[in-house]
Image (tube, coloured by chain):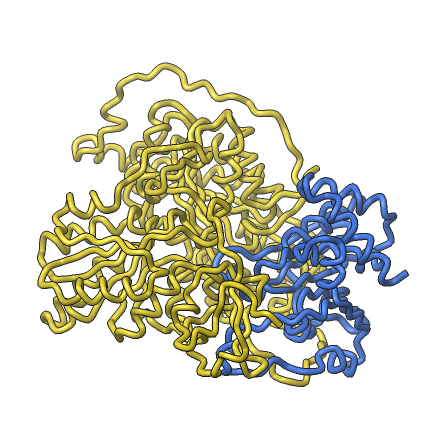
Chain colours: A blue, B yellow
Amino acid sequence: MTKSIMIVGVGGQGTLLASRILGSVLLGQGYDVKVSEVHGMSQRGGSVVTYVRFGDKVASPVIEKGQADLIIAFEALEAARWVSFLKKGGRIVMNTQEIEPMPVITGAAQYPEGIVEHIRGLGIDVVAIDALDLAVKAGTARAVNVVLMGVISHSLDFGEDVWMKALEDCVPKKVIDVNKKAFALGRAVNE
Amino acid sequence: MKLMLGNQAVARGLYEAGVDVVSSYPGTPSTEITEFASKYDEMHSEWAPNEKVACEVAVGASIGGARSFCGMKHVGLNVAADPLFTASYTGVNGGFVLAVADDPGMHSSQNEQDSRHYAIASKVAMVEPSDSGECKDFTKMAYELSEKFDTPVILRLSTRVAHSQSPVDECERVPHDTGKYEKHPEKYVMMPAYARPKHIVVEERISKLKAYAEECPFNRIEWNSDEIGVITSGISYQYAKEALGDKASYLKIGLINPLPEKMILDFAAKVKKLYVIEELDDVIETHCRKLGLSPTGKELFTFIGEYSQSYIREKIFGEKDEFAIYPESVPVRPPVMCAGCPHRGLFFILKKLGVMVSGDIGCYTLGAAAPLSAIDTTVCMGASVSGLHGFNLARKGEYEHKAVAVIGDSTFIHSGITGLINIAYNATNSTVIVLDNSITGMTGHQNNPANGYNIKGEPASAVSIEAVCKAVGIDRVRVVDPNDLAETEKVIREELAADAPSVIITRRPCALLKSVKHKPPVFVDPDKCRSCKACMRIGCPAISMSTGKAKIDDTLCVGCGLCEQMCKFDAILDTAPQA
């Protein structure tokens, strides 16, 4: 059975690295994997989404409304935007960090309030954490992506060593220590 | 096994096939092919000034005996079409493959054209992979086809194939022998006396390829149920498989031009209901109709945008997935110019002056979005310059003092120079602004002929944009720092007023370049801020007013100083106010 994970956020938050780590873990476990990314115009601070699908044999690289088993949202508004992609009984792991989009900055729109509560109100299993705070504690605000990988690592039934190897394969050597720390802080959230 | 982007797998295929020469122009979603190719030192890889040059380099390299490659996005093939159509007549010496990446859904493009028409029109073979493994295998096979049938081969990709990762097996590189060069004018000199017999050869070749299509291993049938038969190719095959599973049988076409005939007729005869599922145009469907079949195709499936598993399942079975709906409206998050972007100041001034802005292709196309909303037109690479000349002719001089063209450094090199020659030669008092940020930005930071570095980041000859402008006959050439708002406004006013054609080069490197040293973030003194929102008019993503006073996000701000120039109350400071 093919499983579908979405990684959503704002261009520049490091969603691509997160999808590479996840892809590396899954391929290492012997799954067929497809990871679909966005590049170009869609990247410049816009809403970004990466699809990760794995199973015995994966055909389509994309995920659509009502199909995701897990959504990892790097930003609160993006969690609200993509929540309709979740399958019934699916789970959303979200960073509570708020990044204002241009229509909010210019005053043309309001940043929505009570996003976590609204999503819970839909009967959805939500894990909401301040991943930015944990990333800063680990040593860099840029490690939000790896903190979130730590948080979701419990949702997949692989040992911690599998994740550490993927981190070493995907993260530059000079920042590996801070990223390992970020992962550990994320992983500790659910323990 | 490695997870690879489709584009990375194409590059791996080039390496393994023994390709020696790779020449491309960047364009989403094709760019990474050549970026990954440049990491293999066994191949010469380069960024050419445009796709026509890249294609001609590859044609020349093929004639020279090497296996050669050029890659581009779909609209790039419009630029490279000229050499392609005649390379079809000359054929090849070393194998020649041209990759073209279509962008259904226009994730990062100005139109949604279907490149399969080019293969039909130029009468060359075209192959279309549907995942990364096929990207590598089809690339290698394309070189064998190219040399066996003496034809250029087009490798057609689409965004979801080019930009999806899936597992790929790596093999060793097999070097290609370039052989001895022999002069062969009747094959390579396409003047009428030699071209006429070559057209006969081209028609014979397409007949041979048609026969080959019946046995080509990339055209294959997957038998499941005989209730539904689907003829499909590329990413549409993956969507159809996901949607219909074993409730349908599939004729998956890998050789997309020329299409098989007998294979399609046999398949159609064995299924009760026949569908053709193909994104964009009805190329396979039209072929089926010529064979006397009546498949269900575009009467059910759209010509517009991307398909998906849900779309196909709904169209064929009427099934839909249930999903939750967020109870409130969610503000859109469009792409924006980055904090510190050197284009921001320029577009603020252009908006302030209220001029007509003839736009072009690049990050600066975002100057069309609110709150800057400065750009009037965007058509294709280079059209800002030539289009402004036409616009000024139409308005009979009325707009010569209130219209400008904006074009990036890489786009200017690509196809802006010829338009500028036309302005000088055919004499309109047009004002062209070259936004020189020293990089090809939108496609993800590629070096170009104007920035002094080659594809590997090594020092290279650099075009002097000033000298080019002067050499083509523009006497008034000015250079200005676009982050100096007062000076930029003054220079633009002066050049618009002048009764002569002019070029203004706004020069400041892209804020995202690693080589750019940023100043520390700036701060707002809330006591001095009068909430006048002047700083909000530049559309900087680091500035917000959520607390009623201006606030600057110090994780985004790079200290470009633009907002300080906007503030009339000196409320924006270089150092944090003491608490």
Query: Residue at (68%, 59%) from the top-left corner?
Result: B242
Q: Position of residue B286 (x, y in %)?
A: 43, 59
Is any part of residue B428 visible from this angle? yes
Q: Position of residue A26 (x, y in %)?
A: 76, 48
Give the residue furthest to the front. Answer: B578
Q: Position of residue B243 (x, y in %)?
A: 67, 63
Query: Residue at (53%, 30%) from the top-left corner?
Result: B40
In the rendered image, the quadrant that contains the N terminus of chain A is bottom right
Give the residue furthest to the top. Answer: B180
Query: Is B384 situated left or right of A10 in this image?
Result: left
Query: Residue at (66%, 35%) from the top-left corner?
Result: B169
Relative to B182, residue A146 above or below? below
Quarter of the image for residue B250 reads bottom right
Depth check, front residue: A105 or B167: A105
Depth check, front residue: A136 or B404: A136
Depth check, front residue: B261 or B572: B572
